[in-house]
Each structure stands twice: as structure tokens, then as C-alpha cells.
Image (spheres, rainbow, N blue to C red):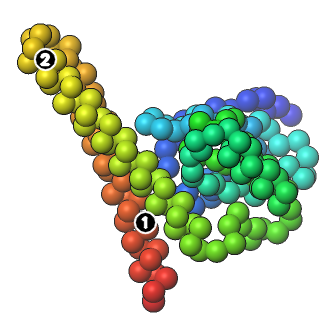
Amino acid sequence: MTQKKSVKKVYQTFVDFKEEEKWLQEMLEDGWMLASYDSEDLEACQYVFHPVHTEEEKQRIYKIDYRTFGKKEQFEEYKELFEDAEWTLLSKSKWYSKHIFYTEQSNPNQEIFSDQQSYEERNKRKQQSYMMSILALCICIAVTVVLYAIYQRTAFLGASLVMIVTIIKLVRDYVKTRALVTVKANHKSL
């Protein structure tokens, strides 16, 4: 019998939290439990998986929240709140925006929030994050164009081009996220 690698790293980008949660569950069904992940601010997120060793580990349920914290105390209170509800947080620090939780409770319909409004607010927070990143990059592009006009160095234009490509990706992801929110809102009103 061949033995599984002890670590599996996967780079992946998701716009829809439900899709990401489903993918994490599928990885678990395939025998890989999420051990850690890197924050996915502008690039694909790196997920690190370890093989499942026990039946309890295979019963995990993954859920995702999206929020930022100004102070470490806020993050600690947030973490404690979910731990009291038997959720384990995998994010490493308050600097992460995406927070992945798991529970080993046996209810397959276990949810991280108790109401639909909390899910809608999570999606709005992600949209705001996209908009802030787009705004910051637009300001950086303006600065590099001014620097190019002053110093005539093509490196400034190259940096602007990279930022434009990043903005296009962010706008695309923002539109996808907004479309998901709109579809869910329309579905809810029916």
C-alpha cells in the first residue's frame, strides 16, 4: 500500500465563499484536512493540507467569515466567541481578512452564523475590501504616472502596467461577488 504525502499545498482563488467551503469539504472527503492557509489579498491563496488520520477529523465542517480587525483584542474576542460555540479558527492573526473555521460537531448542516443577514454582511465586507484595494492601486498608478512625467523612467510605466492588470483582476472579482450577492438577494425575494 502506498502512503500519502504528509503535506499537500494547493494555490486556489475563490470569489464565492460557498464554493470555497464546498471545495474544502471535497478535499476532506478525499482524505485531506486543512491545516493552514495564507491570506489571499491580491493573489491566489495557498492552502496547506495534511492527511486525515481519524474518523473525527473526517467529520469536520468548514465555514468562512470575512472581516478585518483594528486591534488584537477585537480579534481575540472574535476568536473566543467562536471557540465557545465549538468552532476552531485557522487564521493566524488579526491581519487576515478571510477566517476559516472548522468544527467536528456531527451536524452536516452546521452554520457559522445564525441568520441570513450575517452572510450578506460578510459578502459586503469582501466587496468593500475589493473597492479599497482598487482605490489604493488607482492612487499608486497616478503617482507612478506623475513620477514618469517628471523623471522619464520607463520603470514607472512598467509598475503602472502591473497595477492596471491587478486592478482588472480586482474589478472582475468585485463584479462576480456583486453578481452573487444580487442573485442571492433576488432568490431570497422570490
Q: Secondary structure at mark 2?
A: helix
Q: Does 154 sit left or right of 40 as displayed? A: left
The amino acid marked with disc number 2 is Tyr
Q: Residue at x 68, y 38 (%)?
A: 72
Q: Does 53 sit left or right of 178 as displayed? A: right
Could you say where residue 173 lies in the image, as x and y percent from the top left? 37, 51
Quadrant in the rendering for residue 142? top left
Q: Could you give the CA–CA distance between mark 2 and mark 1, rounded to whole angstroms? A: 39 Å
Q: Which residue is mark 1?
A: 180
Q: Which mark is residue 91?
A: none
Q: Is residue 100 visible?
A: yes
Q: Quadrant of the C terminus?
A: bottom left
Q: Residue at x 57, y 66 (%)?
A: 119
Q: Nearer the viewer, residue 35 or 128?
A: 128
Q: Residue furthest bottom?
A: 190
Q: Which residue is mark 2?
A: 148
Q: Nearer the viewer, residue 135 or 48?
A: 135
Could you say where residue 112 lies in the image, as x and y percent from the top left? 70, 63
Q: Secondary structure at mark 1?
A: helix
Q: Nearer the viewer, residue 172 or 142?
A: 142
Quadrant in the rendering for residue 164? top left
